[in-house]
Amino acid sequence: METNKKVFSGVQPTGNVHLGNYLGAFRNWVALQDDYDAIYCIVDLHGMTVPYDPPEYRRTRLETAKVLLAIGVDPDRSLFYMQSQVPHHAELAWILGTITPTGVLNRMTQYKDKLATGAPANLGLYSYPVLMAADILLFRADLVPVGEDQKQHLEMTRDLAERFNNRFAEVFPIPEPLIPATAARVMSLTEPTAKMSKSDPADKSRILILDSADVIMKKVKSAVTDSEPTVRYDTEAKPGISNLLEIMAACTGRSIDDLVSEYHDAGYGRFKEAVAEAIIETLAPIKSAYERLDDREVARILQKGALDARTQAEVYQSEVRRAVGLDQM
Ligand code: TYM
């Protein structure tokens, strides 16, 4: 088995893949393929923890796979598959569940946030972070590229890995999160004190990876800002403008200071146009790569990924089964 350092990350295939997903996580996914053994998983068991429509889910699962391939996830260099096709994720989640105090789950802010937005309380949603820990620990990941909103789940994963190692045997490395310096938490365009999210009912709140140039321009132009007309970075007083500055910095590679000195007195209209253009330029190659993908070829890539992932997972999981006393008689 390989000895390189491992990267694992996942995305829920619930549709509306947006700029926050890209800048907060997927860009790092692509970059890390050069130096790590990368494992990227479409976590379709996680996506079922909120109400969904099965035929629509089939569509968004495939769409999510295509977006990731278009962004640059390379199945020749990375293990790329759907979580539901590798039953070891669910098995490890069960085992980890037996050492997860419910008190720890009660503190998870994402669970509370989801209930607050009307999601029905169910066991799957409640134990979501345990399945996420299983995803990460299954292949013994060292590094997990995610946006800032996943920090608490990562801390819980580290805690579970330590609990397991202390209780049974030194099986799991303790994984580190990798959170980008800029755009770790891209905010909603319509409500810039909340994060940009797939599930916000307002379409204008997010830029989709597959939005056309026209739509991107319109959405950015209608982004909520404030009435003081200078462009400067102040997340408390000017959350809308600060968000646009972060987005533009992440898209262009320029520093926020540099952007502020160029656009300080430019007026919001001109600044917003420049932000929209930077986004359009960043997303255009992804959109055209997406359009060139063939659905059947993508399905084949996923089938091969699942087969490879199952084979590798079986080897890793046998070590866990042995440690907990579930090895074959
Ligand atoms: P998900 O599907 O919500 O999002 C995928 C990735 O995008 C990041 N992200 C953001 N980054 C910056 N700004 C935003 N507004 C924003 N919104 C989302 C997320 O942090 C994430 O990295 N629980 C995970 C899925 C998961 C997972 C895992 C991740 C399941 N198992 C194992 C890593 C490792 C989630 O819901 O991501």
Image (cartoon, rainbow, N blue to C red):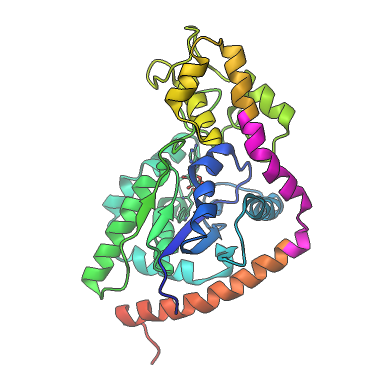
Q: Which residues are magenta?
A: 278-297
Is residue 193 shown to the viewer in this render?
no
Work out whether residue 190 or residue 226 is closer to the camera in this orientation and state it.
226
Whether residue 238 is situated above or below residue 244 in the rendered picture:
above
Residue 272's x, y, as percent?
A: 59, 19
Residue 46 at x, y percent in the picture: 51, 54
Question: Residue 61's quadrant in the figure?
Answer: bottom right
Dominant secondary-structure state across the stretch colored magenta: helix
- Where 131 falls versus 118 (above or below)? below
Q: Residue at x 31, y 73 (%)?
A: 171
Q: Which quadrant of the rendered structure holds the N terminus? A: bottom left
Asked whether the viewer can see residue 176, the reply is yes
* Left/right of residue 202 with respect to residue 93 in the rendered view: right
Q: Percent from the top left, x then y, of residue 186? A: 49, 33
Write down the quadrant of residue 165 in the picture.
Answer: bottom left
Q: Is residue 111 left or right of residue 304?
A: left
